[in-house]
Image (spheres, rainbow, N blue to C red):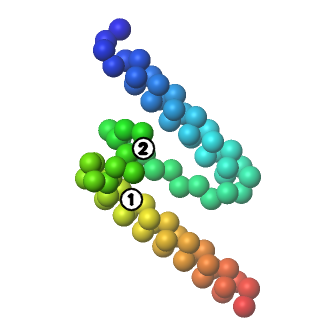
Amino acid sequence: MRAGDSSRRGVRSFARRGLAYAGLLEHFGVRVQILEAKGMVHGFLRMGGLVPEALEIVDTSLSTCIISSIARRRERTFRNP
């Protein structure tokens, strides 16, 4: 076994559990957006000052969520005047 193999297995397992949880939420009607940030450590979104890529990912993710939320609200408004 090479150095780091064990930790990568843990990350893959963590990712699988996250995807399974997202699937469960979708099953119950919760809208889910999956963000896969390859090469990032767990909790990197809170490390904007240390991980420059985190700020870009947060900006992109928030923009996508806000735009999606506005579109859904408009859709409901026009469907049910």
Say whether residue 41 is left or right of residue 18: left
Say whether residue 15 is left or right of residue 22: left
Residue at x 60% of width, y 82% of height: 74
The x and y percentages for residue 22 are 61, 46
Give the label on residue 58, or none: 1
Residue at x 56% of width, y 40% of height: 18
Label 1 sits on a secondary structure element that is: helix
The x and y percentages for residue 17 are 58, 34
Q: Earlier in the sequence, mark 1 or mark 2?
A: 2
Say whether residue 15 is left or right of residue 24: left
Looking at the figure, which quarter contains the N terminus?
top left
Question: Mark 1, residues whose alpha carbon is within 10 Å: few (<14), some, or many (≥20)?
Answer: some
Looking at the figure, which quarter contains the C terminus?
bottom right
Question: Mark 2, residues whose alpha carbon is within 10 Å: few (<14), some, or many (≥20)?
Answer: few
Depicted 13 relative to depicted 63: above or below = above
The x and y percentages for residue 8 are 40, 25
Quarter of the figure with residue 69: bottom right
Q: Which residue is mark 2?
A: 43
What kind of residue is marked 1?
A: Val
What kind of residue is marked 2?
A: Gly
